[in-house]
Image (cartoon, rainbow, N blue to C red):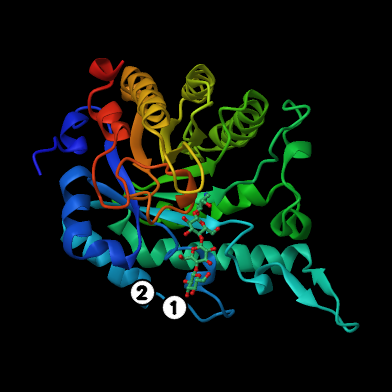
Amino acid sequence: KDLTPIKDVYSKDFLIGNAVSSEDLEGVRLDLLKKHFNVATAGNAMKPDALQRTKGTFTFDEADKLVDKVLAEGLKMHGHTLVWHQQSPAWMNTKTDAKGQTVYLGRQEALTNLKTHIKTVVEHFGKKVISWDVVNEAMNDNPVNPANWKNSLRQSPWYKAVGSDYVEQAFLAAREVLDKHPDWNIKLYYNDYNLDNQNKSKAVYNMVKEINDRYKKTHKGKLLIDGIGMQGHYNISTNPTNVQLSLERFISLGVEVSITELDVQAGSDFKLTDKLSDAQGYLYAQLFKIFKAHAKSIARITVWGMDDGTSWRSSTNPLLFDKNLQAKPAYYGVVNPDKFM
Ligand code: G3I
């Protein structure tokens, strides 16, 4: 009860976010969310399979309820995600052929599906969101030759159906909507994990640079991709120096950066010793020292869930609060990195 709100500690630096489902927006969970956080991401409710499971039928009710509640409680909302290889309905980029086999759609049909989804969703939520993850996780895990970013792209259904320019096409579709609404001020993000891996971060750097350079030439120096989201699914062996190197590499591109899905695995089988819990707190502290030092270029730091009990990787205790919603050393590492170290 007497805990310092995380969002107050960083009010001059960046927004502090959490991932939410509708169950997080009631009772004590909502109290905790409002106390410490000022922006939310829907953990699942705004993904393609939630919004357009059947072609042409958009189901916004649940997401609308969630977004409206978040805004009514005084938090901002980030949109996640428009294009991904997971939690996306198969019809968007594949079909069943005459022999009953699944095959990829032709480029034009897939592109139309991609663009229709993006435009409808961006238009629908409008300025209720401050930013969108336009494309999520397009890059391979450990690119051998990051200079050749096209060869480093994940062989996802979108890649197979559309080709390597699906990323750029997705951003162009989202940008087209924003251009119709000059008052919206919504940032368009490329979002990915393991960006502390230097090869992966270089490949993403090269992709964003090429796409933005091309756009700038014909659009008076404006960016097509406004920001890069480093998901931040770390573990206690993650080397913070690698996180810093990638962060600085992205900042040098002139885009804003956000940490979009932060968590730090520690322990296993739902067990966490004091020693590992402290090591986890120490890593959170090291990371927040780095984030604070780069606050000018960081828009938002979002933690991926409230407590270890409801985390997507619950068994490895990755969050700031335990399953009883009690603050862990990880919380103290975040609110007072200097003291913790
Ligand atoms: O809603 C159903 C429920 O009806 C059913 O009974 C239950 C049984 O399995 O599943 C429920 O759906 C689950 C959903 O989360 C909601 O809890 C899905 O199975 C489960 O796969 C889904 O996991 C989500 C995961 O993305 C799927 O890829 C996690 O909650 C979500 O936190 C996670 O988030 C992703 C980001 O979007 C992208 N980056 C990685 C991150 C972690 O995987």
Name the residue that disc number 1 marks.
Answer: 59
Image location of residue 16, percent across then percent down: 28, 39
Quick one: label 1, few (<14), some, or many (20+) residues within 10 Å? some
What type is the residue that disc 1 sits on?
Answer: Thr
The residue lying toward the viewer, choosing from 246 and 158, is 246
Q: Quadrant of the N terminus?
A: top left
Q: Nearer the viewer, mark 1 or mark 2?
A: 2
**Left or right, residue 157 beside residue 70:** right
Q: Tell me if label 1 and label 2 are in contact, CB under 8 Å.
A: yes
Image disc number at residue 216: none
Give the secondary structure at mark 1: loop
- The residue to which callout 2 is attached is 62
Residue at coordinates 32% horizontally, 40% vertically from top-left? Answer: 320
Q: Nearer the viewer, residue 248 or 224?
A: 248
Q: Is residue 16 left or right of residue 121?
A: left
- Residue found farthest to the left: 2
- Percent x, y of residue 54: 57, 80
